Image (cartoon, rainbow, N blue to C red):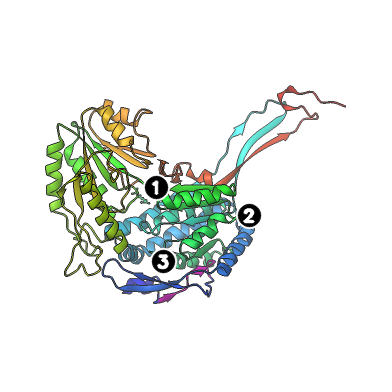
């Protein structure tokens, strides 16, 4: 496969790096099998503890130099990374599609998301601004400024094997931080490929070794990062279970964490919706990435007057879906990541049935030619009730639950009535409904859209959610602030020392 060679991937790849240097390890080898055809793509060696300490020590050293580079100069390096990613868009997009299983369009889209965040970060490198404030004391000046934190530890998930890392890293880098990445062991080659792309740019710009650390590993490596007092910020994307463990470990040492965890996203379809938009938005939201986005649409909350119409339109749309090799652009839906995910999908279907769910589009595992990996499943739809335990739970698979409502207030209550709080949408042409949904009495999620599905956010907005989603914000808007520490500076240029609050203290 040509794209593997152009990304400098071989059958055996080292998994520990500080940028341009790759290290031997005593760690085990992780084999990466493609969910597309079940074939072994290559192996990557995980870090041992000595490797890990070496990468962190190198990162600490690099930080001392990197933080002295002017932010726009760091931005220039990120600009060149954006250029390199444009060059590698095709092979990297193909690798994402082949190793993770998402459609080729979505693989390219993921690389585009990396390019977009690079562009955003370049501009931001000239805008890391604080406020100038008026002092209560005469001839005093006060302002706040932002300084880099140090090492940012990044734990990323398989479903966005490259983009989510880049959101954190590109912002961290322009802020003056150094980054250490523990990618998902399910998509290790994507991470190795990114490190190769970065290292070419870093070498050309004499970026200190250690600014981009890679520590391939399983759960243990994540635990090392979370517990490490040398790492002021841990950014973790993945399940709520993982996030709770990371948050507890980081909080125990009073570190900062940025968590982007599970979602249980819903679209409210009003009786005043443009149903063509609503159906297409729901369809992409529910079956895109085979239901493995944290923003996947898992629940449709449909007004009773249009319920039957929406239901029959969905059934016919699902009937037209093509499931198969995601690298073949005629297919809409690729495989799940692995057979464990298939088991969880099957168990969730059973649980839904046991609770009374009525499947109007049946699920199941596909077999036969083209489906040899055993990871292809049918996207399915069940009529359900909001309080079913399975409806409250995030299953990372294409299972869509239909729920019925009568009033908009009831719809919002159903939308909010889950433990997660990432993304939400309303499909309506009614201004009052739309504004209510966006108001303080509306959606409780980090993302709330009108006439757009729940997935596919642009990088320019802050990305993340509330409740069990973890509260973190990544990517656009002012999400950069979490990667920096704020310092308040007060300068006295008078000939006296007046005290704040008018306190008198004289000898
Ligand atoms: C994720 O699934 O972890 O909004 C990230 C979206 C993408 C990012 C998803 N831009 O669906």
Q: Is residue 95 visible?
A: yes
Q: Which residue is mark 3?
A: 188
Distance between the alpha carbons at the discs numbered 3 and 1: 24 Å
Residue at coordinates 20% horizontally, 29% vertically from top-left?
A: 406
Q: Which mark is residue 68?
A: 2
Q: Quadrant of the N terminus?
A: bottom left
x%, y% of residue 144? Answer: 62, 38
Q: Position of residue 375 (x, y in %)?
A: 26, 63
Tell me: residue 439, above or below residue 353: above
> Relative to 284, does residue 366 appear above or below in the rendering?
below
- Mark 1 residue's CB less than 8 Å from ligand 1: yes
Q: Nearer the viewer, residue 38 or 280?
A: 38
* The C terminus: image quadrant: top right
Question: For numbered disc 3, what is the local secondary structure?
Answer: helix
Segment colored magenta:
12-20
The answer as to whether callout 3 falls within 8 Å of ligand 1 is no
Is residue 126 something one can see in this rendering? no
Sequence-wise, the earlier of marks 3 and 1 is 3
**The disc label shown at residue 459, or none:** 1
Q: Whole-Å distance between the Cαs marked 2 and 3?
A: 32 Å
Look at the numbered discs 3 and 1 and tell me whether their residues touch, using CB distance below 8 Å: no
């Amino acid at each position: 496969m040509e794209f593997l060679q152009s990304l400098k991937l071989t059958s055996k790849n080292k998994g520990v790096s500080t940028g341009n240097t790759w290290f031997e390890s005593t760690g085990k080898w992780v084999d990466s099998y493609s969910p597309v055809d079940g074939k072994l793509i290559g192996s990557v060696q995980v870090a041992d503890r000595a490797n890990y300490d070496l990468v962190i020590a190198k990162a600490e050293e690099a930080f001392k130099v990197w933080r002295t580079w002017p932010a726009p100069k760091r931005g220039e390096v990120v600009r060149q990374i954006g250029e390199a990613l444009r060059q590698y868009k095709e092979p990297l997009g193909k690798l994402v599609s082949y190793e993770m299983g998402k459609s080729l369009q979505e693989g390219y889209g993921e690389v585009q998301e990396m390019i977009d965040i690079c562009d955003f970060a370049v501009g931001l490198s000239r805008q890391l601004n604080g406020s100038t404030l008026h002092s209560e004391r005469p001839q005093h000046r006060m302002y706040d400024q932002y300084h880099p934190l140090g090492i940012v530890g990044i734990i990323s998930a398989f479903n966005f094997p490259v983009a989510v890392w880049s959101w954190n890293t590109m912002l961290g880098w322009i802020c003056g931080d150094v980054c250490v990445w523990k990618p998902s062991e399910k998509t290790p080659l994507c991470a190795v490929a990114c490190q190769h792309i970065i290292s070419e740019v870093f070498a050309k710009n004499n970026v200190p070794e250690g600014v981009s650390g890679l520590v391939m590993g399983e759960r243990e490596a994540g635990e090392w990062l979370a517990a490490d007092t040398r790492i002021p910020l841990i950014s973790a994307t993945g399940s709520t279970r993982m996030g709770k463990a990371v948050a507890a470990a980081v909080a125990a040492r009073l570190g900062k964490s940025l968590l982007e965890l599970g979602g249980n996203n819903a679209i409210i379809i009003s009786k005043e919706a443009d149903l063509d938009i609503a159906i297409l938005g729901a369809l992409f939201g529910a079956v895109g990435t085979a239901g493995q986005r944290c923003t996947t649409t898992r629940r449709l909350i449909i007004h009773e007057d249009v319920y039957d119409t929406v239901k029959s339109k969905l059934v016919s749309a699902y009937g037209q879906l093509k499931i198969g090799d995601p690298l073949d652009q005629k297919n809409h839906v690729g495989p799940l990541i692995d057979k464990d995910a298939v088991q969880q999908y099957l168990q969730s279907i059973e649980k839904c049935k046991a609770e009374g769910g009525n499947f109007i589009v049946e699920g199941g595992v596909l077999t036969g030619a083209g489906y040899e990996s055993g990871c292809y499943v049918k996207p399915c739809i069940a009529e359900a009730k909001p309080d079913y335990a399975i409806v409250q739970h995030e299953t990372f698979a294409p299972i869509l639950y239909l729920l019925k409502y009568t009033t908009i207030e009831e719809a919002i209550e159903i939308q909010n009535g889950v433990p997660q709080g990432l993304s939400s949408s309303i499909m309506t042409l009614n201004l009052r409904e739309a504004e209510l949904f966006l108001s303080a009495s509306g959606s409780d999620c980090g993302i709330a859209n009108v006439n757009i599905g729940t997935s596919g956010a642009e990088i320019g907005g802050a990305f993340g959610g509330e409740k069990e989603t973890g509260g973190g914000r990544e990517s656009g808007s002012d999400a950069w602030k979490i990667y920096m520490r704020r310092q308040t500076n007060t300068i006295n240029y008078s000939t006296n020392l007046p005290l704040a609050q008018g306190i008198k203290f004289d000898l």
